[in-house]
Amino acid sequence: MAYDQSAMNELHWLIDMVQTIEVGLVVLDRNYDIQLWNGFMENHSGVSPNSIKGSNLFEQFDYLPATWLKQKMESVFLLKNRAFISWEQRPYVFQFGNYRPITGRADFMYQNVTLLPLSSLTGEITHISMIIYDVTDVAINKLQLKAANERLEHLSQTDGLTQLHNRRHWQICMQREFDRHARYGEPTTLVMFDIDHFKRINDTYGHIAGDKVIQHVSHILKQSLRETDCAGRYGGEEFSVVLANTDAKSALNFADRLREKIAASEMLYESAKISVTVSIGICDIEEELENSGKWLANADHALYEAKQAGRNCCRIFEG
Ligand SMILES: Nc1nc2c(ncn2[C@@H]2O[C@H](COP(=O)(O)OP(=O)(O)OP(=O)(O)O)[C@@H](O)[C@H]2O)c(=O)[nH]1
């Protein structure tokens, strides 16, 4: 008798805990009809256990990804194994609002869900249980950390003045294109250019005007690029571009168009109209090129020749 009493007590406590625990508990039968719906589910869905018991889960919540979820549930019935749904795979299964004040930034509750086979007294799997965990805090923290890391990564790769790749990151891209050429042999060309007599701009109009000219030139450069081109600010007023799938002749077309666009444009600074020109060096990858450093040096040499030839012109490196 005393044993019965204690067992009854235990059962009572368990039911109480199931009702009040801060985790969602749902039991479904073989037809996905709801057999148990605890307090957590009631609080977040607004639907009481009495009104939902016996109704079909997928009819009750028609937004549920039925095909996908049924497939997972069938495998739980069949293989008698647990299955997990992580918020990273699917942010939520049940569309519940997020009421937590600390994570007010999320509009919905992120969830991890476990599907658990429930066996009858004969050992048959007749039901499954869904256990729904609110992981909004963890998810938001992780997403914020990821976003912050992405911002930091972008900052560490980007030149602040022009928003082009900075020198270090551009060199990594350039090396990648050099290696790609070694593997696939596609024509790849390096273009380096430098603003002519830039010192005079600084001396005449001041450093701020000089900075604006650098931004102006990089803006025109960005407009001229294709998706696959990799452009960077190599140094103060020196820019570098790797043109993928482009031979020296096509690169010369690109470079001449860019040069003409820059020469034809004007930048307004205070009441002054500032025009600049650029000199451009071009070098494609030849078979005898030992490394990317030599490629860069050759393009730089071609740029030097363009300067020597009177500036505002392009030169292709001739070995
Ligand atoms: N405003 C500004 N000036 C810079 C920046 N980086 C480098 N410079 C200046 O750019 C000038 C480069 O001058 P030089 O290398 O002599 O070349 P240049 O006057 O352009 O002459 P050429 O290249 O021979 O046509 C220097 O005066 C640098 O101080 C920058 O970020 N902003």
Image: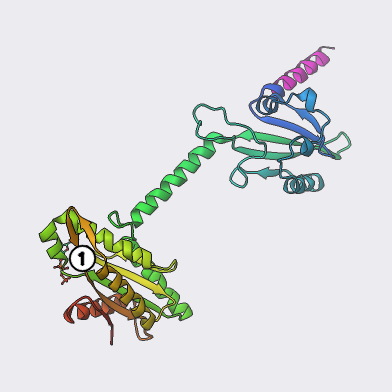
Residue 40 point in image, percent of width and height: 67, 26
Q: Which residues are magenta?
A: 1-17
Q: Is residue 2 in the magenta section?
A: yes
Q: Nearer the viewer, residue 263 or 122?
A: 263
Q: Residue furthest left?
A: 203
Q: Residue furthest right?
A: 122
How crowded is the residue under tag 1: few (<14 C-alpha within 10 Å), some, or many (20+)? some
Residue 151 vertical placement versus 199 (above, below): above
Q: Is residue 134 left or right of residue 167?
A: right
* SS under mark 1: loop
Q: Residue at x 28, y 73 (%)?
A: 260
- For the question of whether residue 167 can be seen, the reply is no
Q: Is residue 211 in the magenta section?
A: no
Residue 204 point in image, percent of width and height: 11, 60
Q: Which residue is mark 1?
A: 275
| Dot 1 amino acid type | Ser
